[in-house]
């Protein structure tokens, strides 16, 4: 029997005694157990219960009857549901890509040599630490069409005032602007961390080879920011599909249903307008939100995995 000259047998690993392995596993389980209990209590149980309620109809006295897929059939013939979906789509379309582009531009600017850049980073990040309700209240004051800060600025430069609250399109625009003001700091922070992880030697090599600043950014820096972009895309899409606090504090979904997003519609159905009688229908809307978010995340995850495999030549 001959041995291949290049094949070197791997050294045998020393086996850990069973008692030590069992003690380590028990300690790890002890540390994980509180988190598992909290996750099951506050995430898994409400999720399963929402699925169960979505197949029920409740009357005003709290009695329940089994409705099967009745709530879901009603949903797909409900024009307000589709208007809420359209509002959520418009909100997502204008907040996610625009917010990420602004965050990337600010991160590139503040990653360079700029006097007082730490102060600018803090100012841009500051709105993110304010709660969504407080941000919404502040936005309602800023975009008040009678005494608001924004309208007074427009009038000061000779522009007409805007019906920020009584016009549905302008009301949704105000919500989008306030959301961008609040969320762009998060995008900037993640991109800033990604930029600081880019090896300067790679960019220096590109400059030596004659690449311009834009070519270096387009073909080297931007691809290396792929993990940051993927993370921000997932987080911002989930946030956009679940936005509630800012919308509710600014407009309560009005005027009419012109700024009602899908989550605020579920809340209006289940708790605000109809009492407990439409709790099952509100739960069905919530289940659809969950399934849409899950599907979007799965598609993004699949596309990112394919991109990484293609880059690795696999």
Image: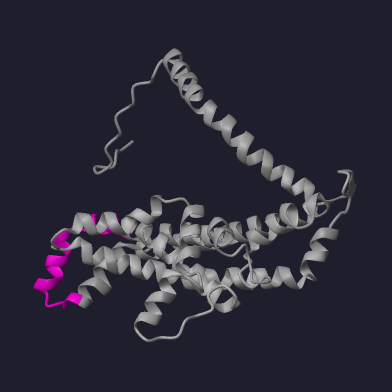
Can see residue 314? no
The prevailing secondary structure element of the residues shown in magenta is helix
Pick whichever, 110 or 273, lies toward us.
273
The location of residue 3, given as percent across then percent down, is 29, 38
Say above or below: 28 vs 161: above
Say above or below: 23 vs 35: above
- The outermost residue toward the front is 147
The location of residue 270, given as percent across then percent down, is 74, 53
**Span of residues in magenta:** 191-213
Q: Residue at x 54, y 26 (%)?
A: 33
Q: Residue at x 35, y 64 (%)?
A: 311
Can see residue 206? yes
Does 111 appear in magenta? no
Q: Quadrant of the N terminus?
A: top left
Q: Residue at x 38, y 62 (%)?
A: 184
The location of residue 202, given as percent across then percent down, is 17, 63
**Image position of 18 (left or right of 50):** left
Does 203 appear in magenta? yes
**Image position of 173 (left or right of 223):** right
Pick whichever, 110 or 267, lies toward us.
267
The location of residue 17, given as percent across then percent down, is 41, 15
Say above or below: 176 vs 185: below
Which of the 4 image quarters holds residue 49? top right
**Image position of 84 (left or right of 297):** right
Pick whichever, 184 or 236, lies toward us.
184
**Image position of 62 (left or right of 268):** right
- The outermost residue toward the left is 208
Which of the 4 image quarters holds residue 24? top left
């Amino acid at each position: 029997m001959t041995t291949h000259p290049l094949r070197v047998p791997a050294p045998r690993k020393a086996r850990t005694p069973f008692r030590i392995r069992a003690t380590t596993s028990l300690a790890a389980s002890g540390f994980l157990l509180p988190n598992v209990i909290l996750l099951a209590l506050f995430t898994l149980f409400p999720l399963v219960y929402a699925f169960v309620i979505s197949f029920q109809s409740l009357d005003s006295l709290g009695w329940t009857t089994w409705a099967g897929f009745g709530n879901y059939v009603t949903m797909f013939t409900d024009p307000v549901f589709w208007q809420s979906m359209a509002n959520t789509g418009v909100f997502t379309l204008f907040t996610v890509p625009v917010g990420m582009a602004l965050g990337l531009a600010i991160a590139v600017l503040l990653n360079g040599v700029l006097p007082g850049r730490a102060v600018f980073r803090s100012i841009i990040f500051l709105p993110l630490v304010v709660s969504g309700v407080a941000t919404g209240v502040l936005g309602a004051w800023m975009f008040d069409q009678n005494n608001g800060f924004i309208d007074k600025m427009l009038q000061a430069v000779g522009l007409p005032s805007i019906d920020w609250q009584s016009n549905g399109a302008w009301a949704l625009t105000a919500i989008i602007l306030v959301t961008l003001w609040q969320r762009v700091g998060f995008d900037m922070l993640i991109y800033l961390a990604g930029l600081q992880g880019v090896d300067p030697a790679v960019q220096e090599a590109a400059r030596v080879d004659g690449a311009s600043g834009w070519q270096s950014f387009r073909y080297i820096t931007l691809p290396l920011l792929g993990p940051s972009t993927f993370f921000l895309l997932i987080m911002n899409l989930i946030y956009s599909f679940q936005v509630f606090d800012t919308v509710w504090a600014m407009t309560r979904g009005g005027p009419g249903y012109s700024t009602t997003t899908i989550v605020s519609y579920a809340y209006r159905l289940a708790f605000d307008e109809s009492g407990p009688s439409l709790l099952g229908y509100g739960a069905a809307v919530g289940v659809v939100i969950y399934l849409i978010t899950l599907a979007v995340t799965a598609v993004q995850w699949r596309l990112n995995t394919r991109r990484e495999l293609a880059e690795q030549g696999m």
